[in-house]
Every structure is written in structure tokens, then in C-alpha cells.
Image: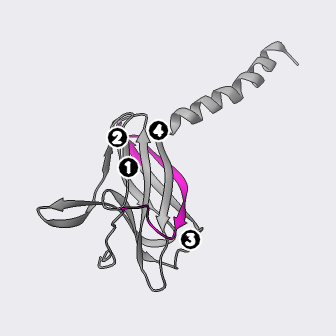
Amino acid sequence: MSLKFRSWALTLPLLLCALGAQAQSLKAEQAWVRATVAQQKATGAFMNLSSSQAGRVIEARSPVAGIVEIHEMKMDGNVMKMRAMPALELGAGQRVELKPGGYHIMLMELKAPIKPGDEVPLSLVFEGKDGKRETLELKAAARGMAPEGAGHGHGHGKH
């Protein structure tokens, strides 16, 4: 085996690992989905998102739901309002928390109940400021109850 070939054989796997690490700008941590009860057709997904580059999450998908949207809940005067958002902006190195009562991913038209302990597959499409897109595939664990103090309203199923 020539020295030149041996050098490439050792260098190529390292190069591919480095490229793979750079290709994924979007990162999700502590992802979870609220478990449902019988006949419930909508629920929320929550997590911490960050990106090494500025951009935005432009789409969310999951095979467990017919409709998946990025939502925001916020106070408007004395009324809590929820709305679908076309995208969720992320600054470079900035962490955005998706939580009950704030930004979240809505899973609507659920195809089956989501039980505590289920692993719910999610896909998030991130678009960098350069226009390049990447998809982050993740699994969110279903939990029976929201963390202390979380108040995520119902009524999401009327879309």
C-alpha cells in the first residue's frame, strides 16, 4: 500500500466527520411532547433550539400528525392569544426556548393518542441567512404532565 493512499485512508474519515459536524447548524435539546388523552386531536412539542448561524426554522413535520405548525402564545392586553408563525427566527449562538405558554410546535389532527414514554419523531427545517436549508431529525419523549407552572391552553384543535 502506498504512503499516499494510506494518508488518504486516514484523512478521509476525519474530513467527513468534520463536514458532517459543520453541516448541522440547528441543535435541539430537551425535546418533549405533551401526552394526550383519548379523543384529543392536538398537542404541543417543546424544546430548546439554538443555531451556530443566524437563520430561521421555516417548517416542522411529524408523521404522527396531519398538521404541524410553529406557534406563539403571548399576552395581548389581558387576553392570551395563540397564532401560527411562518418562521421562528434564531440568532447565531442564541438559545430560543419552546415552552408551554410561549413558542411551541403544534401537532394537530393526531393520527393516534400519544402515550407517556412514546418517542415522537419530528423534523425541523432550518434556513440560514445564506438561503441554504437543512433538516434536523429528532425524537421527543412524550410526558404525561407539563413542568411546574406551565399553562398551555387547549382549543388548538379548531384549525
**Amino acid type, residue under disc 1 in the picture:** Glu
Range covered by the magenta-colored residues: 126-149
Q: Residue at x 56, y 74 (%)?
A: 115
Residue farthest to the top, as pictured? 3
Residue at which label 2 appears = 55
Query: From mark 4 to mark 3, how far is it between C-alphas?
Result: 30 Å
Determine contact: label 1, label 4, CB under 8 Å: no
**Amino acid type, residue under disc 4 in the picture:** Ser
The mark closer to the camera, 2 or 1, is: 1
Q: Earlier in the sequence, mark 2 or mark 4?
A: 4
Residue at which label 3 appears = 116
Query: From mark 1 to mark 3, how far is it between C-alphas?
Result: 22 Å
Determine contact: label 2, label 3, CB under 8 Å: no
**Amino acid type, residue under disc 3 in the picture:** Pro
Q: Is residue 131 above or below residue 158?
A: above
Determine contact: label 2, label 4, CB under 8 Å: yes
Q: Residue at x 14, y 61 (%)?
A: 76
